[in-house]
Amino acid sequence: MLETQLTAEQAIRLAIQEIAVGPDRGRDISAELSQQVMQAILSGEADEVQAAVFLIAMRMKRESLAEFSGILAALQSGIKVHTVSVPELVCMADPFDGFVRTQSMTPFIAPVLAACGVPCMQHGVERVGPKYGVTAHQVYHAAGINVFGNAEDAALQIQEHGWAYLDQSIYAPTLFKLQSLRGRIVKRTALTTLERLLMPLRAQQRTHLVLGYVHKAFPEVYATMAMECGYESIVLIKGVEGGLAPALNKPMRRFIIDAERVQSVNEQKEIIDVAPILTDNEVAGPPMVSSVDPVAQTLDTGLAVLGGQSGSARDSLCLAAGQILNSRDHALSLSQAVEKVQVCLDNGSAKARFDSLIYGRK
């Protein structure tokens, strides 16, 4: 029977029979079958037990690019993409399960980039496993920013204020409904990898993606899938806890892949010594203090940095935002890009952009 003629139940049974065979014996399935199974999971047609077996068996076998492609197509097909009235847009996504070891300054990158004239959007969720760490959603909510606006609201905020946050519960509700199942699965699955690539907003001309990664196998996956999603370019940073902020105490590793220049991912790898750009740092990023509420701690530190305070948190934000500026404008050296961010922090324009989305402020 052709895969296109399978019912949802038949498709997921066939998929599990192929991938969940045993140690090193699982067989890859087609992008078409992967997409059909994922659509059945999203629609609720698939039994939860079978859905969990499918996702974890994929993880244990290791997903092929074709399988990733099919799952991503199913996820993206359920999203209505809204166009923002700006020529270019930078989309950013930290790991959706957040941060537990460091005070991530990446929730503050978007207003900094907006102050530097780069329209951008961050998306995520409030809380998800396996880490259940501090997320941008939690930080923004604690600051008084509406984290449940719809895509039209986000597009308007970008046009008026230069940045916005968009929550997965709003733009991809069927994926969001799988949170309970994912929590019970415990381990990361293909959904953890692919949800950060989804495109809920796009620019009139060019839409760019910025992601962090940890494991060396993922740049190729992210680059390939980003092109399939329709992004014009992707910047991949080896970030602290997989986030958008590079480590302060070691050379920065990143990839810049442009759809117009089709090259292998390895040819695009950059290793940059950041020591001459930053003050001396012995830590990868500002550490979390275990005795303090982590969300309040991250917000307080970020607001202090937006207010001009120096230290490792400022360095983390400057390097994270600066390298994105540098990747977008090759005439701007990394050092010059970091200096541009520092000016926006010192003159209050980045803080004003952050405050512009707080309830009751104009």
Image (cartoon, rainbow, N blue to C red):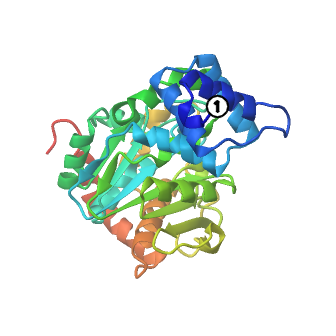
Q: Closer to the camera, 356 or 158?
A: 158
Instruction: Say what amino acid the circle numbered 1 marks.
Output: Leu
- Please identify the quadrant where the C terminus is shown: top left
Residue shown at 54% from the left, 31% from the top: 5
Residue 344 vertical position relative to residue 298 in the rendered view, above or below: below
Q: Secondary structure at mark 1?
A: helix
Residue 127 in percent (x, y) is at 48, 30
Q: Mark 1 — residue?
A: 55
Residue 20 vertical position relative to residue 64 in the rendered view, above or below: above
Residue shown at 59% from the left, 51% from the top: 240
Residue 38 in percent (x, y) is at 54, 33
Residue 59 in percent (x, y) is at 70, 37
Q: Closer to the camera, 294 or 271?
A: 271
- Please identify the quadrant where the N terminus is shown: top right
> Mark 1 Cα within 10 Å, few/some/many (few <14, many 20+)?
many
Residue shown at 27% from the left, 64% from the top: 347
Q: Splitting the image into 4 quarters, where does residue 341 fall?
A: bottom left
Residue 102 vertical position relative to residue 276 in the rendered view, above or below: above
- From where the camera sits, is residue 131 visible? yes
- Name the residue furthest bottom: 331
Residue shown at 24% from the left, 53% from the top: 84
- Name the residue furthest front: 1
359 to the left or right of 306: left
Residue 18 in percent (x, y) is at 74, 34
Q: Closer to the camera, 215 or 101?
A: 215
- From where the camera sits, is residue 95 visible? no
